[in-house]
Image (cartoon, rainbow, N blue to C red):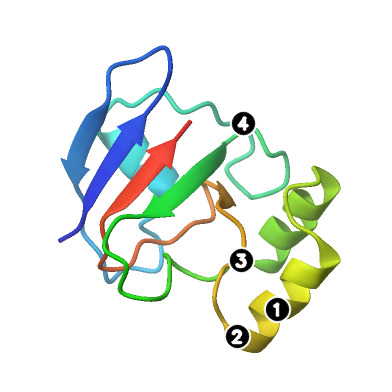
Amino acid sequence: MPNITFSSPIHKDKTVYAVTGSHTNTILKVAKENHIPIDFSCEDGECATCLVKVTSLTRKGKMAGPLTDKEVAVLKEHKKITAEEIERMRVEDVPTTPWRLACQLVLRDEDLLVEY
């Protein structure tokens, strides 16, 4: 079970244990279950309200689940990922940007820092 540390400049940092192995266990779901006030709106990867910066703390290689097509489109629209990064991500199968949508990022077995 990974540790997820949620960090915000206006709220106290909080570290929680998260369950992995489910394709529905997202950062946003973990945040809501633990009363962490990440902003969100659509919960479908279309609005960017839940944009967060994610850093892997375990350095095992891949960082969290892959970006969804919706997530790529929204991040590109908000200039958080370039066409070159998208191409590299598709070739290497590794996220190339720390910016993610909390409602789309599916957890893997690794410790993460989530800045919101």
Q: CA distance from mark 1 to mark 3?
A: 7 Å
Q: Looking at the image, which residue is at 81% across and 46% down? A: 79
**Relative to 42, residue 45 above or below:** below
Q: Is residue 72 left or right of residue 116?
A: right
Near mark 4 (Cα within 10 A), the count class, few <14, some 14-19 or many ≥20, is: few
Residue topped by disc 4: 41
Residue 114, image quadrant: top left
Q: Nearer the viewer, residue 38 or 32?
A: 38
Q: CA distance from mark 3 to mark 2?
A: 9 Å
Report helix, strand or loop for mark 1. helix
Q: Amino acid at mark 3?
A: Thr
The disc, 3 or 4, on the residue closer to the chain's N-terminal end is 4
User: In the drawing, what numbered circle is on residue 92?
Assistant: 2
User: In the drawing, what numbered circle is on residue 96?
Assistant: 3
Q: Looking at the image, which residue is at 73% across and 51% down? A: 75
Q: Looking at the image, which residue is at 30% across and 74% down? A: 60
Q: Looking at the image, which residue is at 46% across and 48% down? A: 54
Disc 1 and disc 2 in contact, CB within 8 angstroms = yes
Near mark 1 (Cα within 10 A), the count class, few <14, some 14-19 or many ≥20, is: some
Q: Is residue 23 left or right of residue 116?
A: left
Instruction: Tell me residue 11's x, y (percent).
Output: 35, 15
Q: CA distance from mark 4 to mark 2?
A: 31 Å
Disc 3 and disc 2 in contact, CB within 8 angstroms = yes
Residue 48, image quadrant: top right
Q: Amino acid at mark 4?
A: Ser
Position of the N terminus by quadrant: bottom left
Report helix, strand or loop for mark 2. helix
Report helix, strand or loop for mark 3. loop
Q: Amino acid at mark 2?
A: Glu
